[in-house]
Amino acid sequence: MSPIEMSIKQKIEAVGTQLKDWDISINYGIKTGYNDAFIISGAVKDELIAADPKSAELIRPILRGRDIKRYAYIDPDLWLIFIPWHFPLEKDSSITGASKEAEALFSQRYPAVYKHLLLHKDKLSKRNKAETGIRYEWYALQRWGAKYRDDFSMQKVMYNDICQRLSFCLVPENVFCVNTVYFIKNNEHIKYLLAYLNTKIVDWYYRTLSVQLGQKAVRMFSIYVLKIPAPIVSVETEEDVNKLVDIINASPESNTEEIEQQIEEIFYKIFNFNTEEIEFIKNL
């Protein structure tokens, strides 16, 4: 590193507290094992619901990595058929393997969705052969976030597994994501952390920690993300940042560069960057 880079890094680390100490949790999205069966278009969703209104109980909006932008996301009109292991008997702890009883009940209660998945049974059954049809039923998701499924029902911050510019966005309740997207569980500082993580400061700093792919892209492994130092600030300062985030989120189609720059300047002051260091960050 150059002397100016060393100075910036030291100031960030001196003031910031690593994310692992912010009482947050990071998880990845749903691993279907075969997206063609479980991730459907809006048109197919409408067909399933038209055939059986109960189908709506199993269908959730879902985002991919390419849909995640800074502060906002693009709605791809894609939907996840959310089927936990042993569904609809997933709460029966006595079931330890693929359950014929669960499958029979599923086919009776949700005939349209069952019929849709039945079209893909051959491919679904050929997923992980040590698990499919042994640990869970052929029609169930390969990994369904068993330990954190409730976190999807809350507001959260999502980000892509691989990116050229760190991009975090606030996602509303009950929106799911694929397993190439990570999400930070909601907490009282979620908007403040969203703002900080989207700064050029963090984009630069993260590259001093992470695995790089080529000249620009980085992998967003949790082991590195949790090492990002974030400054703990006064209630007043956090509220100021949150208000700016609200302005950005209220205008997803507008140019928000000026507001984002105001956020950057708040953190310049927090880290006590000098003029030369600020210019270095601005010119990244």
Image (cartoon, grey):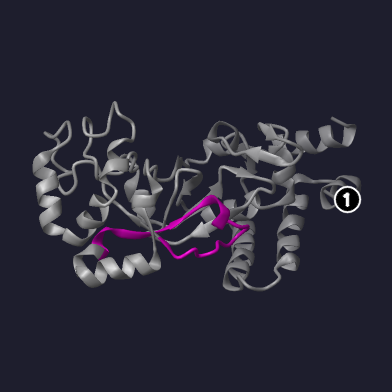
**Residue reaching furthest to the right:** 276
Q: Report x, y in % for residue 132.
A: 26, 34
The residue sitting at 29% across, 48% down in the picture is 120
**Is residue 249 toward the left or the right of residue 124 in the image?**
right
The answer to whether residue 59 is magenta is yes
**Is residue 126 toward the left or the right of residue 253 in the image?**
left
Residue 189 visible in the picture: no
Highlighted range, magenta:
56-78
Residue situated in front as seen by the camera: 101 or 271: 101
> Three-letter amino acid code at disc 1?
Glu
> Where on the picture, by quarter, is residue 174?
bottom left
**Is residue 23 toward the left or the right of residue 85 in the image?**
right
Q: Report x, y in % for residue 131.
A: 28, 30
Which residue, given by chain and number where applicable, does mark 1 sit on? Answer: 279
> Where on the picture, by quarter, is residue 45?
bottom left
**Is residue 275 toward the left or the right of residue 257 in the image?**
right
Q: Report x, y in % for residue 90.
A: 18, 43
Q: Report x, y in % for residue 206.
A: 68, 38
